[in-house]
C-alpha cells in the first residue's frame, strides 16, 4: 500500500475507533491520539519528501500511486504529493489537532461531533493528495455535508438558516466544479485523444481556447465559492459565526483552502491559456473582496463575524495571488493559504474560548479579557497581529510575497489592484486594534466576569500548537519557500509554455 | 569572541530578555525581573561600545573612508533567483552611531524604570516589552535590507503599540495605542509600495545593492527608473517619496504627527526611549540610509523631505508653546526637533561641499537623543512626584527636586542651542548647511529654533519657578537613585556630546568632513535663543497675568495652536465620517442586503414558488389527465416543429 | 366492390379517440370515464385493423394486437370496476370530483 | 424446445410456479396462519433470488418475441433483490393485513409482467408485460380496503393508468401504420423520422413516462404513493419504476435509435421539467410518502439526464444508479413503514428528534437520503455523477446546467428531513420502535450496499462489460 493512503486511513481508523467505544472521555482520547499521530505522520512525510528531493527526485509528484476505481470511466484513485499539497496537508493536520483540543469540553453528542470532524479531515486529506479530478471531487464534496451537521447541531445563533446557506452555496460551487471537470474529461477525449480525469495527463494536453475559457470560468468560480471569493462569499460570515469553534476553525482554516488549492491546481494549471487571458476578471473580484471585505469587517461588532469577514478579505489574497499568474504570486497564494489557515483557526479558537466563558462575542459587551484571562487575551492579540500582517508571524510573509509577486506586472491595472490590496492591511489594522481595544483591553464590564477562569490545558495546547505554526512560518519562511518553490515554478512554467 | 558574534549578540540579548521575562515571567520574582532586564541591556551596551570602537578605530576604515561591514547574512525569503529578502547585520558609521544611541538610552531607561515602575502590577511584562522594543529597534538600525528594515519597522511599531497601551484599562491609553499604530501603519503603506517599486526597479532589496545600482549616474537601473515618469515625476522620485512617507509616519512628520502627542499615554520612560530618542528618529535614519539614492537619483524627493521637515519643525514648535501638559510640550518639541533633522538631510546634496547637511542631521539626531531623553526622564521624575501631567499642578519644584532641576536645566539649554551644550553644535551645523543651500528653509528653521528656546524655558519656569517653593516640602527624590543616576549620565551627554568631532566619523560619503563653526553664523541663532529665554523668564518666572493677556491678544491663532490646528479633528472626520460612515457602513450594508440578500431571496423565492404552484396538484383526477394530454400535445408540437 | 378509403377509417378512429379523451375529461362519473377509455381503445382497434387491411394485408399482426387489446381491456375494466365499487363503499359516490382527499 | 424455453425463461417460469404454489397454499388455507405462510413465501423469495444468479445463455424464443441477455438477467436480478427486500421489510404489515396470499399473488403477477416486459422483443409482448405489471398494482394500491385513502389511490391509479394505456396504444397503432411490423428488429429496420412516426413516438413515450412518473405525466404519483399501503408504495417507487426505466432504455437506444435527435430533445425537456418540478414540490411536503414521491420524480429526471447520454455509458450509469436508488429508497420506505406501523406518524415534523429516540433508524434514513441527494461517501454520489457525466457525453450542456441546479435544490429538500431528525427539537416524543429482525436485515443490506457500491468499481465494470456486448 502506498504510504500516502495512510493520510486517509489514520483518520478513518480513528473513526472506527470512536465508533467502537462508549465512554466520551475515551472518544476524546482516541480522537486526540489519532490527530496527533496524523501530525507526526504528516511531518515525517514532509521530511521524507525533502530528503527524496535532496536525493535528486525530479518527478513532479512523489509517492505517486494509482489504483483503478471505475475502469470504464477512467476513474482512478491516483495519489501523489508535491510541495504545495504537502504544506496543505501539514496545515490540515495541525488545524485538526488544534480543533480536537479546543473541542475537548464539548458535552453534547461527543461521538457524533468527533465523527463529523474526522470525516471532514478525511475529505481534506483526500482532496490534497488526489491527482485524479474525480476522486478529488469526491473528497471535496465529502467535506461539505459534515459541515452542515456540525453547524446545525452544535452551532449557535441562526444556525439552521446559516448551515443551510453554507451547504447549498458550497454545493452550488461544487456543482460548478463538477461541470468543469466533466467538461475536462470529455474535452480531453475530443481534443487530446484520451478521455481522462488525470491531472497529470490533462496538463499535457492542449485544449482549444474556447473550451478552456468555459472550463476555466466554471472551475474558477466553483472553487471560488469554496474560497469565499466575492460575491460568492456570503456563506462564510454566517456559517463561520454559527459554527461551533472547531468547525469554524476547520471551515475557515481548511475548507476555504480546498478552494484555493483547486484554483491553483485545477482552474489555473489545467487551463493555462484561458488563465492567462482572463484572470484579470478574478483580479478585480479578488481586489474587491480584499478591500471591501476589510471595509465590511470594520462594521462588525460580533467577533466571529469580524473574523469571518476578515477571512473573506484575507482569502482574497489567495485568489489575487493565483490570478496574478506570476511565480512569486503563486508562492504567495500558497503561503497565504497556510498562513491564513493557521491564523484564522487560532483566531476562532480564541474567540471560542472567550465566548465559552463570557457567553457573548460582541466586542462592545466584552472588556478586560487580558486582565482576567491573560492567556486567552494574549492568544487573541497574537492572532490579531498575525492577521494585520505583523512581521515575525506568518501573515506578513505571505502577504508580502503576494505583493512582490503582483508587482511584477507593470500595467497600471495590476498596480492599482496591488495598491488597493496593500491598502487593506491598514484597514485590517483598524478593525483588529479596535476589537482588541474594546474586548481584550479595557476593564471588565460585568461583575460576573471577574469569576472567569483562564484557558484550560487543552485550550492552551491548541493555541500553542497553532502559534508555533504561525511563528515557524513567520520566522523561517525559507523552509516553506524551498518546499514549494519548484512546484510553483512548474505551474508557472506550464502556464507560459503553451 | 569575534566581532561578528558580538554584533549578533547585541540585538539578541534584549530578545533573550524579552523571551525570558515574557514566557517565563511568572516564575521570576518581580524584584529580579527589572534587574535581569537591566543587566542584560547593560551587557548589550558594553558590546555596542566594543563594536563601535572596533568599527571606528580598527576595521571600519579602508583607504581613508568608512565602508560598510556586513555580517550574519541569511537568505530569509527567496522570491526569485535574483530577488529575495535577506536578513543580515551591517556596521557602518550611522548604524554604529544608532547602535550606541539605542543601547545607551535603552539601558538608561531600564535602570530608570527600576525606580519609576516599582510596584506596578505588570512590572515583569513591562521589562519584557522593553526588551522586545530594544531588540526590534536594534534590528532596525542594523538592517542590511530594506525589507528587513520594513520588518523591524513594523515590529518597533507593535512594541510601541504595546507600550503605549501598557495601562490598557485606561480608555485613553487604548485609544492612543490604536491611533499610534494605525497612523504609522497608514504611512507604512507608502513605505511598502515604495519598497516594491525600488525592488522592482533595481532587482534587489539590499541597501547596498540598491545604493550601488541607483546612485551611479548612468547605471542602467537608474536610467530605467528615472526614465519612466508618472504625473510628472520619475518612478524613482515616486518610490523615494513613498518610502519617505513611511519615514514621516514613524517620525511623526506633518501630517502624520498626530499620534505622537497621544502616545504620551504610555509610561514616561517609554516616552523617553521610544517616542523621543530612538524609534521616532527611524524616519531620519531611513532617509539617511538611502541618502545616496535620494541625492543622486531623486533630488526632488530630497527637497520634499526638506520642506516637510522645515514646516513640521515650525508647526510643532508653535503648538508646543501653547500646551499645558508637560509631556505634550515635550512631544511637540520632539516632532519639531525631528523636523530639524529631516530638513538638514533635505538641504544636503551629493558632491563636495554639499553633504554637510547629512552630517548635521545625524549629529542632531545623536545629541537630541541624550537631551530629549533627559527631558523626558526629568518630566517622569516630576510626574512621579506630583502625580499629574499638568503644568498648573507644578511650580516651584526647584527646591524639592534639585537633581531633576539641574539636569532639566542643562537639557533645556542644550535643546535651545546655547553654547557650549550639545544642541548648540548640532544646530549650528544644521543652520549653516541650510543657509548655504536654501534660504527659505533656513529662515523657517531659525524661527522654529527661536520658538524652541521659548517653549522649553516656558516649561522650565512653569515647573521649577512660577510659584514660591513650599517651605515644608520634603525632598521628592529621596532614595530614587535608580532614577537619578540615568538622568545624570544623560546630562553628561547633553553637556559634552557636542564636543565629539562628529564629522570625522559620520558623513554621507564615508570620508571625514569638517563641520565649520563660524562666529558670523553663530550670532543670530544664539542671540535669538537667548532673547527667547529671557522672554520666557519674564513671562513665566513669576505668576502674572501677562501670558493670559498675550493669549487674548493672539486670539484665534492661539486657540488654533492650542487645539493643535484642528488636525486631530480632520483625522477624526476622515475616519469616522468618511471611512466608517461612507465606506464601511455601506459596504457592510451592501454585503448583508444585496449580496447576501440575493442568496437569501433566491431561497425564499424558491419556497414561495413551491407554495404558489401547489394548487397544480389539485387532487382532481381529470385535471391530472389533462396535464398528461397537454404534455403529449406539447411534445408532438415540439418534435413536429423541430424535426418534420 | 369499392372499398372505403383508409383515410375515412382513420378519421373515424381519430374522432373516436378524441371523443374518448373528451369524455374522459368531462364526465364526472367514473364508470362513464371508463367507457370513454373504451372508446379510445376502440379507436386504437380500428386503427390496427385498418392499417392491417389496407397497408399490410399479407400478415395478421394488427388483428392479433386488436384481440389482445380487447382481452386486456376487459381485464382492466373489471379490475377498475372492482376498485370503484370499493371506493363507493367509502365515499358513497362515484363522482370523480369528490375524490380528492389527497392533494397538494 | 420446451427445455430450452425452461432454461431461457427461467425467471418467468419460476415466478409463475410460485404463483401457482401460492394458489395451492391459499386453497389449502395455509394463509390463515400468516406467520407460517410468510415464512414459506420468504423461502420462496430467497430461492427465487438465488436462482437468478444461475447463469443463463443469451437467447431468443418465439421468433424473437422473447429474448434474454446478460444485461436483462442482471436487471431481473435487481428487480428480484428489490422484491425480496420489500417483502422482508413488509412482513409485519402483511401479517396484520390478514390477506397475505392475495398480496403476494398480485405482487408476483406484477413481477412476472415486468420480466416479460424486460425480455420482450416485440411491442405486443411489451404491451402485455406492461399491462400485466401495472394492473395488479392498482389492486395493490387499493389493497387496504378499510382505508379511504387506499381506495382513492387505487381509483386514481387504475383510471389514469387506463387513460395512459389508451394513449400508448394509440401511439402503437400509429407506429404500426408507419412501420408495418411491431417486432423490435423490424422497427429498427423500417423506422424513419417522419411526422407519423414522431407522433407515434410521443404517444408511446407518454405511456412510458406515465409509468416512470415523469413530469407532466406524473400527477398520479404523489396521491397514489400517499394513499397506497407503504410496501406497495415502496414497490411502486422502486421495482415498478425501475423495470420501466430498464425497458425504456432498450426501447430508446435500439428500437427508436434512429430517432435519436428527436428523443434527445424530448427527453431533455422532460428531464428538466421532472427534476425541477419534483424538487420544487418536494420542498414543502410534510407527508414523507408524498415527499418521497416527489423526490422519486426528481430522481427520474436525473436518470433521464443519464439516458440522454445515448451511449453505453448511459446504460451503465442508469443501471448502476438504479441499484443504488433501489437500495436507498427501500431503506427509506422500510423505515417510514416501520415507524408508521407502530405510531401512525408519517410527517416530517413527526420525525423531529428522531435521532434522539431512534438513532439507528435516523442514521440509516440519513445515509439513504444522502445517497439520493448524491452526497459522498454514499454510492448515490457516484450514481448521480455518473448519470451527469453520461449526459455530458452527448453535449447537453444546458441540460447539465439545469441538472446541477437541481442537485443543489434536491440537497435542500433532503436536508430538510435531516434537519428535522438531527437538529430540530422534538415536539412529541417518538416511542422507541421495536426492531424486527427482517427489517433490520433489510436495512443492513441497504446500508452496506449504499456504502460499498460506491467503492466497488468492479460492479460498474461488470455492468459495462455486459452492456457493451449488445
Image: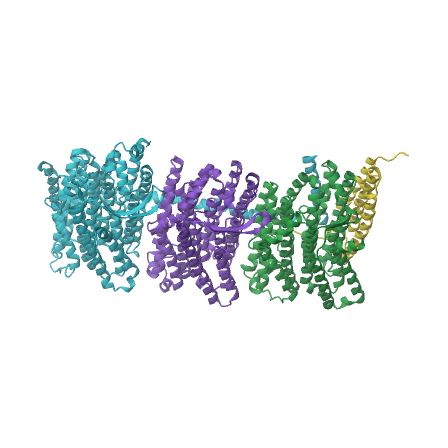
Chain colours: A purple, B cyan, C yellow, D green
Judge left or right: residue A357 versus residue B388: right
Residue at the image point whose x is 66% and y is 50% from the top: D466
Judge left or right: residue A248 versus residue B249: right
Residue at the image point whose x is 50% and y is 61% from the top: A13
Question: Which residue occupies the foreground of this view, B459 or B369?
Answer: B369
Residue D417 position by quadrant: bottom right
Question: Which residue occupies the foreground of this view, B329 or D309?
Answer: D309
Judge left or right: residue A321 versus residue D9: left
Question: Which residue occupies the foreground of this view, B276 or D437?
Answer: D437
Residue D239 position, x and y percent, is 69, 54
Question: Which residue occupies the foreground of this view, D275 or A73?
Answer: A73
Q: Is residue A409 above or below residue B483?
A: above
Judge left or right: residue D262 versus residue A260: right
Residue B90 position, x and y percent, is 24, 46
Q: Is residue D341 above or below residue A397?
A: below
Q: Is residue B241 above or below residue A112?
A: above
Residue D344: in sight, yes or no?
Answer: no
User: Looking at this rendering, what residue extends furthest in the front direction?
Assistant: A55
Residue D243: in sight, yes or no?
Answer: yes
Residue D457 position, x and y percent, is 59, 53
User: Looking at this rendering, what residue extends furthest in the left direction?
Assistant: B519
Q: Is residue A174 above or below residue D82?
A: above
Amino acid at each position: 500500500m502506498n504510504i500516502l493512503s495512510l493520510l486517509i486511513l489514520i483518520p478513518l481508523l480513528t473513526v472506527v475507533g470512536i465508533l467502537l467505544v462508549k465512554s466520551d472521555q475515551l472518544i476524546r482520547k482516541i480522537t486526540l491520539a489519532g490527530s496527533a499521530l496524523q501530525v507526526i505522520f504528516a511531518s515525517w512525510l514532509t521530511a521524507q519528501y525533502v530528503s527524496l528531493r535532496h536525493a535528486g527526485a525530479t518527478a513532479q509528484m512523489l509517492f505517486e500511486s494509482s489504483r483503478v476505481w471505475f475502469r470504464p470511466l477512467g476513474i482512478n484513485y491516483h495519489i501523489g504529493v508535491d510541495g504545495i499539497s504537502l504544506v496543505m496537508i501539514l496545515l490540515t493536520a495541525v488545524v485538526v489537532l488544534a480543533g480536537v483540543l479546543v473541542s475537548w469540553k464539548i458535552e453534547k453528542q461527543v461521538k457524533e461531533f468527533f465523527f463529523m470532524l474526522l470525516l471532514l479531515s478525511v475529505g481534506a486529506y483526500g482532496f490534497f493528495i488526489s491527482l485524479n479530478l474525480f476522486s478529488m471531487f469526491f473528497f471535496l464534496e465529502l467535506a461539505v455535508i459534515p459541515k452542515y451537521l456540525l453547524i446545525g447541531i452544535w452551532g449557535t445563533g441562526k444556525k439552521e438558516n446559516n448551515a443551510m446557506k453554507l451547504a447549498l452555496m458550497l454545493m452550488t460551487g461544487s456543482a460548478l466544479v463538477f461541470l468543469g471537470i466533466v467538461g475536462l474529461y470529455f474535452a480531453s477525449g475530443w481534443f487530446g485523444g484520451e478521455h481522462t480525469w488525470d491531472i497529470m495527463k490533462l496538463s499535457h494536453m492542449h485544449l482549444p481556447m474556447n473550451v478552456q475559457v468555459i472550463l476555466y470560468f466554471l472551475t474558477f468560480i466553483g472553487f471560488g465559492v469554496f474560497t469565499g471569493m466575492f460575491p460568492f462569499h456570503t456563506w462564510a460570515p454566517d456559517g463561520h459565526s454559527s459554527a461551533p469553534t472547531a468547525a469554524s476553525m476547520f471551515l475557515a482554516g481548511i475548507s476555504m483552502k480546498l478552494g484555493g488549492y483547486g484554483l491553483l491546481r485545477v482552474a489555473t494549471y489545467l487551463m493555462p491559456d484561458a488563465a492567462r487571458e482572463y484572470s484579470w476578471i478574478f483580479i478585480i473580484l479578488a481586489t474587491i473582496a480584499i478591500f471591501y471585505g476589510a471595509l465590511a469587517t470594520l462594521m462588525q461588532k460580533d467577533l466571529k463575524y469580524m473574523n469571518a469577514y476578515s477571512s473573506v478579505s484575507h482569502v482574497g489574497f489567495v485568489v489575487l495571488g493565483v490570478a496574478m499568474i506570476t511565480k512569486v504570486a503563486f508562492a504567495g497564494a500558497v503561503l497565504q493559504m497556510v498562513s491564513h489557515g493557521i491564523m484564522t483557526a487560532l483566531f476562532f479558537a480564541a474567540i471560542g474560548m472567550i465566548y465559552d466563558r463570557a457567553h457573548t462575542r460582541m466586542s462592545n459587551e466584552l472588556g478586560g479579557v487580558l486582565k482576567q484571562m491573560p492567556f486567552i487575551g494574549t492568544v487573541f492579540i497574537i492572532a490579531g497581529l498575525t492577521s494585520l500582517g505583523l512581521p515575525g508571524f506568518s501573515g506578513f510573509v505571505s502577504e508580502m510575497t503576494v505583493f512582490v509577486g503582483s508587482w511584477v506586472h507593470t500595467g497600471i491595472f495590476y498596480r492599482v489592484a496591488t495598491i488597493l490590496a496593500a491598502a487593506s492591511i491598514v484597514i485590517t489594522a483598524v478593525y483588529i486594534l479596535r476589537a482588541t481595544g474594546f474586548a481584550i483591553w479595557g476593564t471588565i464590564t460585568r461583575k460576573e466576569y471577574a469569576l472567569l477562569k483562564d484557558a484550560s490545558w487543552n485550550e492552551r495546547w491548541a493555541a500553542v500548537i497553532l502559534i508555533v505554526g504561525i511563528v515557524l512560518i513567520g520566522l523561517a519562511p525559507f523552509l516553506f519557500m524551498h518546499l514549494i518553490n519548484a512546484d510553483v515554478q512548474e505551474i508557472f512554467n506550464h502556464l507560459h509554455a503553451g | 569572541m569575534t566581532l561578528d558574534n558580538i554584533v549578533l549578540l547585541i540585538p539578541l540579548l534584549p530578545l533573550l530578555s524579552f523571551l525570558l521575562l515574557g514566557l517565563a515571567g511568572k516564575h521570576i520574582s518581580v524584584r529580579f525581573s527589572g534587574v535581569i532586564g537591566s543587566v542584560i541591556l547593560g551587557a548589550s551596551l558594553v558590546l555596542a561600545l566594543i563594536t563601535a570602537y572596533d568599527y571606528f578605530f580598527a576595521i571600519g576604515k579602508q583607504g581613508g573612508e568608512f565602508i560598510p561591514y556586513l555580517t550574519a547574512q541569511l537568505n530569509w525569503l527567496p522570491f526569485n533567483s535574483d530577488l529575495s529578502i535577506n536578513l543580515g547585520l551591517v556596521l557602518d558609521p550611522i548604524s554604529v552611531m544608532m547602535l550606541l544611541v539605542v543601547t545607551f538610552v535603552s539601558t538608561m531607561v531600564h535602570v530608570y524604570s527600576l525606580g519609576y515602575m516599582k510596584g506596578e502590577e505588570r512590572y515583569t511584562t513591562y521589562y519584557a516589552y522593553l526588551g522586545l522594543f530594544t531588540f526590534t529597534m536594534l534590528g532596525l538600525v542594523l538592517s542590511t535590507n530594506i525589507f528587513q528594515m520594513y520588518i523591524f519597522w513594523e515590529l518597533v511599531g507593535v512594541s510601541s503599540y504595546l507600550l503605549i497601551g501598557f495601562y490598557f484599562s485606561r480608555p485613553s491609553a487604548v485609544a492612543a495605542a490604536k491611533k499610534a499604530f494605525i497612523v504609522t501603519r497608514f504611512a507604512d503603506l507608502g513605505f511598502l509600495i515604495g519598497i516594491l517599486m525600488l525592488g522592482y526597479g533595481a532587482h534587489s532589496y539590499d541597501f547596498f545593492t540598491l545604493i550601488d545600482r541607483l546612485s551611479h549616474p548612468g547605471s542602467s537601473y537608474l536610467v530605467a527608473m528615472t526614465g519612466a515618469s508618472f504625473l510628472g515625476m520619475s518612478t524613482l522620485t515616486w518610490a523615494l517619496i513613498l518610502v519617505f512617507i513611511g519615514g514621516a509616519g514613524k517620525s511623526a512628520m506633518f501630517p502624520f504627527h498626530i499620534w505622537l502627542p497621544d502616545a504620551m499615554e504610555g509610561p514616561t520612560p517609554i516616552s523617553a526611549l521610544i517616542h523621543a530618542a530612538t524609534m521616532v528618529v527611524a524616519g531620519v535614519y531611513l532617509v539617511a540610509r538611502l541618502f545616496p539614492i535620494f541625492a543622486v537619483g531623486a533630488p526632488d524627493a530630497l527637497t520634499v523631505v526638506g520642506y516637510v521637515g522645515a514646516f513640521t519643525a515650525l508647526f510643532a514648535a508653535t503648538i508646543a508653546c501653547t500646551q499645558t501638559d508637560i509631556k505634550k510640550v515635550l512631544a511637540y518639541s520632539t516632532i519639531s526637533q525631528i523636523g530639524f533633522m529631516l530638513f538638514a538631510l533635505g538641504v544636503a546634496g551629493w558632491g563636495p561641499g554639499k553633504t554637510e547637511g547629512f552630517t548635521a542631521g545625524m549629529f542632531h539626531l545623536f545629541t537630541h537623543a541624550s537631551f530629549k531623553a533627559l527631558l523626558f526622564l526629568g518630566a517622569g521624575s516630576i510626574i512621579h512626584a506630583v502625580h499629574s501631567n499638568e503644568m498648573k499642578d507644578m511650580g516651584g519644584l526647584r527646591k524639592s527636586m534639585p537633581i531633576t532641576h539641574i539636569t532639566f536645566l542643562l537639557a533645556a539649554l542644550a535643546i535651545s542651542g546655547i553654547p557650549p551644550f550639545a544642541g548648540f553644535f548640532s544646530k549650528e551645523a544644521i543652520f549653516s548647511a541650510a543657509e548655504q543651500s536654501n534660504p527659505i528653509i533656513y529662515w523657517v528653521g531659525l524661527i522654529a529654533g527661536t520658538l524652541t528656546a521659548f517653549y522649553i524655558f516656558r516649561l522650565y519656569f512653569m515647573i521649577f519657578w512660577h510659584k514660591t517653593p513650599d517651605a515644608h516640602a520634603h525632598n521628592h527624590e529621596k532614595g530614587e537613585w535608580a532614577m537619578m543616576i540615568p538622568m545624570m549620565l544623560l546630562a553628561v551627554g547633553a553637556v559634552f556630546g557636542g564636543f565629539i568631532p562628529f564629522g570625522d566619523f559620520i558623513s554621507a560619503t564615508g570620508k571625514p568632513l569638517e563641520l565649520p563653526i563660524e562666529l558670523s553664523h553663530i550670532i543670530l541663532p544664539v542671540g535669538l535663543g537667548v532673547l527667547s529665554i529671557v522672554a520666557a523668564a519674564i513671562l513665566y518666572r513669576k505668576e502674572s497675568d501677562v501670558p493670559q493677556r498675550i493669549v487674548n491678544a493672539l486670539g484665534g491663532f492661539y486657540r488654533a495652536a492650542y487645539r493643535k490646528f484642528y488636525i486631530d479633528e480632520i483625522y477624526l472626520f476622515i475616519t469616522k465620517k468618511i471611512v466608517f460612515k461612507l465606506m464601511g457602513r455601506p459596504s457592510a450594508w451592501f454585503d448583508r442586503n444585496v449580496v447576501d440578500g440575493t442568496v437569501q431571496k433566491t431561497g425564499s423565492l424558491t419556497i414561495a414558488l413551491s407554495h404558489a404552484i401547489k394548487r397544480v396538484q389539485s387532487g382532481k383526477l381529470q385535471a391530472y389527465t389533462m396535464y398528461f394530454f397537454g404534455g403529449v400535445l406539447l411534445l408532438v408540437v415540439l418534435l413536429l416543429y423541430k424535426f418534420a | 366492390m369499392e372499398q372505403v378509403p383508409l383515410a375515412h377509417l382513420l378519421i373515424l378512429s381519430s374522432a373516436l379517440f378524441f371523443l374518448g379523451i373528451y369524455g374522459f375529461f368531462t364526465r364526472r362519473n367514473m364508470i362513464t370515464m371508463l367507457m370513454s377509455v373504451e372508446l379510445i381503445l376502440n379507436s386504437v382497434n380500428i386503427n390496427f385493423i385498418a392499417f392491417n387491411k389496407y397497408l399490410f394485408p399479407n400478415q395478421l399482426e394488427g388483428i392479433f394486437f386488436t384481440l389482445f387489446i380487447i382481452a386486456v381491456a376487459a381485464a382492466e375494466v373489471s379490475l377498475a370496476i372492482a376498485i370503484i365499487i370499493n371506493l363507493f363503499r367509502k365515499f358513497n359516490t362515484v363522482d370523480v370530483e369528490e375524490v380528492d382527499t389527497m392533494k397538494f | 424446445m420446451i427445455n430450452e424455453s425452461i432454461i431461457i425463461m427461467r425467471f418467468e417460469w419460476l415466478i409463475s410456479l410460485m404463483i401457482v404454489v401460492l394458489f395451492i397454499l391459499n386453497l389449502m388455507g395455509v394463509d390463515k396462519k400468516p406467520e407460517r405462510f410468510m415464512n414459506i413465501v420468504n423461502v420462496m423469495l430467497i430461492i427465487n433470488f438465488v436462482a437468478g444468479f444461475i447463469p443463463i445463455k443469451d437467447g431468443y424464443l418465439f421468433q424473437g418475441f422473447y429474448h434474454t441477455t446478460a444485461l436483462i438477467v442482471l436487471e431481473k436480478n435487481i428487480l428480484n433483490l428489490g422484491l425480496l427486500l420489500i417483502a422482508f421489510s413488509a412482513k409485519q404489515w402483511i401479517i396484520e393485513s390478514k390477506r397475505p396470499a392475495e398480496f403476494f399473488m398480485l405482487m408476483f403477477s406484477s413481477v412476472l409482467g415486468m420480466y416479460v416486459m424486460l425480455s420482450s422483443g416485440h411491442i405486443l409482448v411489451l404491451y402485455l408485460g406492461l399491462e400485466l405489471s401495472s394492473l395488479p398494482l392498482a389492486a395493490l394500491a387499493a389493497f387496504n380496503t378499510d382505508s379511504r385513502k387506499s381506495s382513492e389511490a387505487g381509483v386514481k391509479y387504475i383510471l389514469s393508468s387506463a387513460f395512459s394505456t389508451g394513449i400508448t396504444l394509440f401511439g402503437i397503432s400509429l407506429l404500426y401504420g408507419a412501420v408495418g411490423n411491431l417486432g423490435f428488429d423490424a422497427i429498427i429496420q423500417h423506422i424513419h423520422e417522419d411526422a407519423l412516426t414522431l407522433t407515434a413516438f410521443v404517444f408511446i413515450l407518454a405511456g412510458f413516462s406515465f409509468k416512470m412518473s415523469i413530469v407532466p405525466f406524473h400527477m398520479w404519483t404523489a396521491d397514489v404513493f400517499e394513499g397506497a399501503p407503504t410496501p406497495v408504495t415502496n414497490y411502486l417507487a422502486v421495482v415498478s419504476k425501475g423495470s420501466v426505466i430498464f425497458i425504456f432504455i432498450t426501447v430508446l437506444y435500439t428500437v427508436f435509435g434512429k430517432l435519436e435527435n428527436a428523443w434527445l430533445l424530448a427527453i431533455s425537456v422532460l428531464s428538466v421539467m421532472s427534476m425541477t418540478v419534483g424538487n420544487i414540490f418536494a420542498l414543502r411536503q410534510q407527508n414523507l410518502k408524498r415527499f418521497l414521491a416527489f423526490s422519486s420524480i426528481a430522481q427520474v429526471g436525473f436518470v433521464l439526464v443519464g439516458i440522454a447520454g445515448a451511449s453505453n455509458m448511459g446504460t451503465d450509469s442508469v443501471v448502476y444508479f438504479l441499484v443504488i436508488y433501489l437500495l436507498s429508497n427501500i431503506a427509506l420506505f422500510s423505515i417510514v413503514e416501520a415507524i408508521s406501523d407502530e405510531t401512525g406518524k408519517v410527517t416530517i415534523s413527526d420525525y423531529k428528534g428522531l435521532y434522539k429516540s431512534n438513532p439507528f433508524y435516523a442514521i440509516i434514513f440519513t445515509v439513504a437520503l444522502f445517497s439520493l441527494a448524491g452526497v459522498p461517501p454514499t454510492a448515490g454520489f457516484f450514481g448521480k455523477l455518473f448519470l451527469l457525466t453520461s449526459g455530458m457525453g452527448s453535449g447537453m450542456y444546458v441540460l447539465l446546467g439545469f441538472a446541477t441546479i437541481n442537485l443543489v435544490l434536491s440537497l435542500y429538500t433532503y436536508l430538510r428531513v435531516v434537519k428535522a431528525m438531527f437538529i430540530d427539537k422534538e415536539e412529541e416524543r417518538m416511542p422507541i420502535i421495536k426492531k424486527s429482525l427482517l427489517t433490520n436485515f433489510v436495512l443492513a443490506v441497504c446500508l452496506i450496499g449504499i456504502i460499498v457500491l460506491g467503492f466497488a468499481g468492479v460492479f460498474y465494470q461488470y455492468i459495462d462489460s455486459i452492456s457493451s456486448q449488445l
